Amino acid sequence: MIPATTLLQQLEGYAKLIDGAIETKDWDELNEILIKRQSVLEELCGLPLSSHERDAVVQIMTLMQMTDRQFIAVVEVQKELLQQQAASLAHDRKAALAYQTE
């Protein structure tokens, strides 16, 4: 069994990994990081915790919620940009096909 303090430290490190994956637009890596983070969270929540450890878990989870909101906002912007690029590409393809058929 991994000690709660070790799991708490692992959780703290995930924010930088998530930020890095978003910054490099590595969506597969982001997905893997989120899966790993969820696993650590589940393991941590299954442990018997002291009141001090419980307070630390609540604090980290609150911080995670705040940073996740920021990450989601950034990802939403990236999603919108990708959708615009896809729409533009589809429009360009239609124009090219129309030009070729004339």
Image (tube, rainbow, N blue to C red):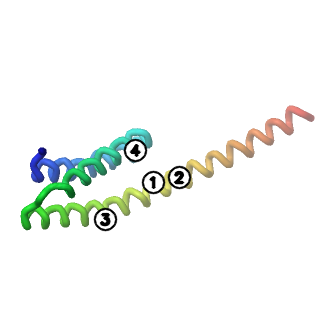
The residue to which callout 2 is attached is 79
Q: Residue at x 64, y 45 (%)?
A: 86
Q: Where is residue 35 in the image (x, y as percent from the top left)?
A: 34, 46
Q: Which of marks 1 and 4 is in front?
A: 4
Residue 66 bears which disc, if any? 3
On the rendered image, what quadrant is the N terminus found in?
top left
* N-term-proximal mark, 3 vs 4: 4
Q: Position of residue 12 (x, y in %)?
A: 20, 52
Determine contact: label 3, label 4, CB under 8 Å.
no
Q: What element carries label 2?
A: helix
The residue to which callout 4 is attached is 31
Q: Disc 3 and disc 4: Cα gap in Å?
A: 19 Å
| 64 left or right of 70 in image | left
Determine contact: label 2, label 1, CB under 8 Å.
yes
Q: Which residue is drawn at 38% across and 44% down?
A: 30
Q: Residue furthest right?
A: 102
Residue 75 bears which disc, if any? 1
Q: Which of marks 4 and 2 is in front?
A: 4
Mark 3 residue crowding within 10 angstroms, few (<14) / some (14–19) / many (20+): few
Q: Disc 4 and disc 2: Cα gap in Å?
A: 15 Å
Q: Residue at x 80, y 41 (%)?
A: 95
Give the amino acid at mark 2. Lys
Give the amino acid at mark 1. Val
Q: Position of residue 25 (x, y in %)?
A: 44, 43
Q: What element carries label 3?
A: helix
| 49 left or right of 31 in image | left
Q: Disc 1 and disc 4: Cα gap in Å?
A: 12 Å
